Amino acid sequence: MFSKLHILPMLLAAPVLLTGCGEPPSETDAAGGSPVLATVAGEPVTEADLLAEAKWRMERREAIPSTKELLDELIQRRALLAKARSEGFDEDPDTRRRMENLLIAALRERDLEPAVANAQVSDEELREEYENRSAELGTKDLDRFAILFLEADEKRPDDYRAEVRSRLEEGVAKSDANPAPGGRGPAAGGFGAIAVDYSDDQAGRYRGGDIGWIEAGAGSARVPDSILEVGRSLEPGARSGIIEAPEGFYVIMKTDSRPGGLPAFEKVSARLYQDLLIAKRQQLQQDFMADILSAAEISIDADALAGVELPASSESLAPPVAPTGPAGVPSPAASR
């Protein structure tokens, strides 16, 4: 006895010989009224079947053989199907799953994918989205600061703190006498090279004391809020005096500022369009599935479900690989 894996290739390779078998039956198929051309495993192959096969090939621009050759191919196909069914292939879980996935994919291809592919966002929708998301799209005022900081804990003696303060005054005087070039960016403006010798802020001392952009109302892990508030009160390019704090002494400079507000529509329209298009496509998919479920008239027996015990999953098992689908459309496996 051949196994199921061996019988199909042999059937595919074997030619079907009608010569010597006489003329095909000429009876009429009782169900459809089409002349019966042959019988395979008790099932008729009709003229309508032959014409349907020819039409299918023509629509796909495939060559159509002679009538006899086309009938031979149909007979081979019917014989293979009959053998596969008799061997139980149509009841095999893996085979059934593949067949179901093909049906689901065909349904999606006809009813969902064209709608998803043709989804559009109108100018009115884009403008409405811009207005509805104004709070999200808007930005706060930004300020950029540079600092000089020398550490001198308040628990240290007063004369030590006085000495540290005096040293910082010296650094400020040097900075005022030789100001760094202006401009944006961490390497320009601020206190320039003076920060290397007169600041203990390791992150900014080699960048002119720069601590970066900070939103209005936001804090910084490197500078106390009270120091930032002094900095925010300054005009761009201005610096504070020496500010005493429990941990030492600061000087803060506002090196730049940018007003916040809602960006121009043209600057964010492409992003908004993409967001809306994705949302539309997702909604189409959700509506498609909701309609399918509604039409199916589903009922669930909660009591029977509560009594089901599934086998425990093994951690050693690899997760199943989901079939891939068209871009933007869930694969059949994703909707299980």
Image: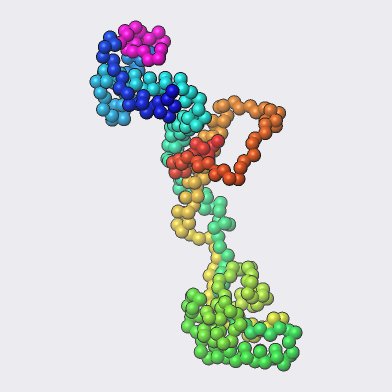
> Which residue appears at 68% of the width and 85% of the height?
152
For this orientation, the residue located farthest to the top is: 27
Q: Nearer the viewer, residue 263 or 120?
A: 120
Image spot of residue 20 (x, y percent): 26, 11
Image spot of residue 104 (x, y percent): 48, 32
Split into 4 quadrants, where in the image is the C terminus?
top right
Q: Is residue 79 left or right of residue 174?
A: left
Residue 71: quadrant of the picture: top left
Image spot of residue 121 (x, y percent): 46, 45
Split into 4 quadrants, where in the image is the N terminus?
top left
Q: Nearer the viewer, residue 62 or 245?
A: 62
Q: Is residue 130 above or below residue 201?
A: above
> Which residue appears at 34% of the width and 7% of the height?
27
Most frequent secondary structure within the magenta stretch: loop
Q: Is residue 212 visible?
A: yes
> Which residue appears at 32% of the width and 23% of the height?
14
Residue interval drawn in magenta: 24-42
Q: Is residue 113 above or below residue 137?
A: above
Image spot of residue 112 (x, y percent): 46, 35
Give yes or no for residue 40 being in the magenta stretch. yes
Give yes or no for residue 20 being in the magenta stretch. no
For this orientation, the residue located farthest to the left is: 66
Q: Is residue 177 above or below residue 316?
A: below
> Which residue appears at 50% of the width and 36% of the height?
332
